[in-house]
Amino acid sequence: MDDSFSSEDDDHLFDLDYHPYARKRPLSSRLDRDEHDETDDEETNRQKLYLVPYRWWKETQRSVADQIGGILYTVLSNDNYADSQIVLELRKEESSGDRVKAEEGVSGRAYALVNEALWLQTLKWHNDSKASENDARNHIVAEDQSQEVFLLQIRLSFSPETNSLLVKISLKDNTVNLYQRACCIFSSESELLQIWDFSGQTSQFVMNEIINLPNISSGKPGKEGELALAFGELLRKLWAPGAVPVAPRMFKCKLAKFAPQFSGYNQHDSQEFLAFLLDGLHEDLNRVKCKPYIEAKDAEGCPDEEVADEYWRNHLARNDSIIVDVCQGQYRSTLVCPVCKKVSVTFDPFMYVTLPLPSTTMRTMTLTVFSTDGIMLPTPFTIAVPKCGRLKDLIDTLSVACSLRNDETLLVAEIYKNQIFRLLDEPSDSLALIRDDDKLVAYRLPKVSETYPLVVFLHQQVERSYSFGVVASNWKPFGVPLVARIQDLSSGSEIRNQFLKLLCPFLMPVEDVVNDYDGNETGNTVNENSKMEDIVSPLVSDSDVGSDSGAENDFRLNTDFKFYLINKLEPLEIKMNKPVSISRFTKKFDVSVHWSEKMMEKYDTCLLSSLPEVFKPQLFTRRPQESISLNKCLEGFLQEEPLGPDDMWYCPRCKKPRQANKKLDLWRLPEILVIHLKRFSYNRFFKNKLETFVDFPIHDLNLSNYISHIDSQLSNCYQLYAISNHYGGMGGGHYTAFVDHGHSRWFEFDDDKVFAVSEDRIKSSAAYVLFYRRVREA
Ligand SMILES: [Zn+2]
């Protein structure tokens, strides 16, 4: 037997029957079905690949300027004599392109998988070199040559269990003689065997299986496998040699037929589309024709492993398709009744994982902090607080943000129409009571003053209106109220002194004031001031501001604010040299401050008047970008949480709907893991898109810490191979995709344009759906 195999020269050739399901009609047969009958199609159009010694390919390539990049597989062989077949398991080398290049052809037993054109080239090279060699030796034995090159029938298939390609050489496909020769070559004891794919076919194997397997005869009624056929057609166009951009019109048309929600040219959600497509392909390709009815058994007391396997077997009994093989995993979902502690465990399949972004549980709020120390100007702070948090969370976070000192407290107030609309002083109040368009301020107050009455200063300025040639003047509120806690109310000047202290930060720079006064002396401001004395208003008295504060310094003499105590009846002017007439039990009272036009110029009132909203969604500018790791999103997803009040669970023991605690765990992971980042949130009132930057791993997503069931046979490591990006907001926007074309060569697909893109550019806040595939443990 060994004699017939020329061992010093590895010149042998295999015909690799690439088509894995010979009984099915191959893809290419549809191209020209009119010209041939079915049998002819099967034979002539069967896609064949050829396995040749790597050296042959290398020799042939010497004459070719641009060498084709290949995919390297390491071969694990397993000759099963009982079944009379050799099974070679092809495991893709996950190394980078550079390493692969360096190792090219290192193994003495390397083979190359080539297409027919390349095979003919290598055969020609082989024959030419043999001929010249034989010429030199001057003996030509035609029979010897024919023995060196022999045809061996090989079948190639994909094993979803191990995520590897299987090459099977069986006795029933070949003659005994050839099978034995194959056994010698591929014996498992021999040194490392490697196969290079230069045909570009093996990476598309999964897709080809889809193309070849439309379940035309038994799809869902009305569907008839049309979706899978249309999708297969689209893939064929996309992967055709000399590929050009493809407009998927036919496919879209077919899709809209089954899913009218995707008709028209509005923007749709790429994740919703994916979910629909995977479901549809699964139904079309489901090998189960008649779904058996399976009664759920009570699994109480059984180990989780057994229950999970039982669930999975039942699922597979009804659902068996390449989509299930490749894309589906299993969750463990645990519900605990908060009353009777009844635990219910179920194991449900999933096709993709939808991860909440932390911002859906957090919200940003902007508050303006007003100091009362007479030094700092009001400053807005934007903080992130839990959506379902309490006022205490807000105050704690804001205290840190504004570096609140230990001897200070924050008083949060909502401002509406230049007044304090309400004080937020109950720490346990829900933050849900604060709306995005509210305007909030926080006053920093000394802790020691907490028991003193709170004085709220409300600003008023003169507003003139002209009608029928008559000038009418009125007092009109403006600006954000200032507050102080004042212990000593024995004279009105205490009120004024406190107010002037609060205003200090708002004083215009001196040179500006001087310039203003320079101008005013020749201008009409003085006249305006004198006119103000004539304003007919019940609120303005003729009281002499300066006279009762003669002891005060110049700075205070130069002010002419008037203060009125607001009580239920009518404003009462506060006299500087008289006690403030309020009850000693009063905890809070309002003081209306009248600003003369002179004072309006002396202070920068703009700083007092601009107040941002709690949160302003902006159409064209992005929110300050938050960054979060994918692991944090996973933790949020797997965190135990109570069901919402609209989503109660019927407890079988209490016989009542209960707001159970729910906990999800990953149990069984799929080969292809689709992760959907929940960027879009909808509720009854508004729709929102989160621009959070999610930092996701590209090469080493390890889910070992998140899976509660350890299957030592399978790896929990994943590598990213594609991203669906969404740019823009809710109504419109634009989708692009990043795809790894192997060996970390990333491309950006933007409509009909394709660009190479470096790997460090693929992470962005546009990433919406992430596609990972399982790799061996690092
Ligand atoms: Zn219960």
Image (tube, rainbow, N blue to C red):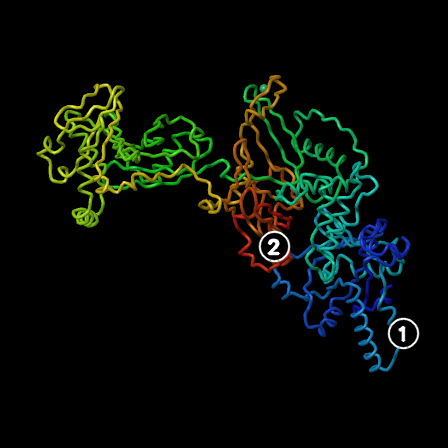
Q: Compared to 668, does 718 lie above or below? A: below
Residue 384 locus on image (x, y percent):
42, 38
Q: Amino acid at mark 1?
A: Ala
Question: Disc 2 marks which amino acid?
Answer: Asp
Residue visible at 81% across and 34% down in the picture: 290
Could you tell me which residue is drawn at 73 percent across and 39 percent down?
A: 258
Between discs 1 and 2, the one toward the N terminus: 1
User: Which residue is painted at 64% across and 48% down in the image?
Assistant: 774
In this rendering, position of residue 148 left or right of residue 749: right
- Relative to 25, is 257 above or below? above
Query: Which of 636 and 616 lies nearest the eye of the viewer?
Result: 616
485 displayed left or right of 240: left
Q: Identify the residue at the far left of this view.
A: 551
Q: Quadrant of ligand 1?
A: top right
Give the labeled residue for mark 1.
142
Percent position of residue 233, x then y: 76, 51
- Residue 591 in percent (x, y) is at 24, 28
Residue 238 image label? none
Which quarter of the image is occupied by the N terminus? bottom right
Is residue 763 something that shows in the picture? yes
Q: Name the secondary structure under disc 1.
A: helix
Seen as rendered, the residue at the extreme top is 655
Location of mark 2 (residue):
750
Q: How many marks?
A: 2
Gap between marks 1 and 2 measured at Cα = 56 Å
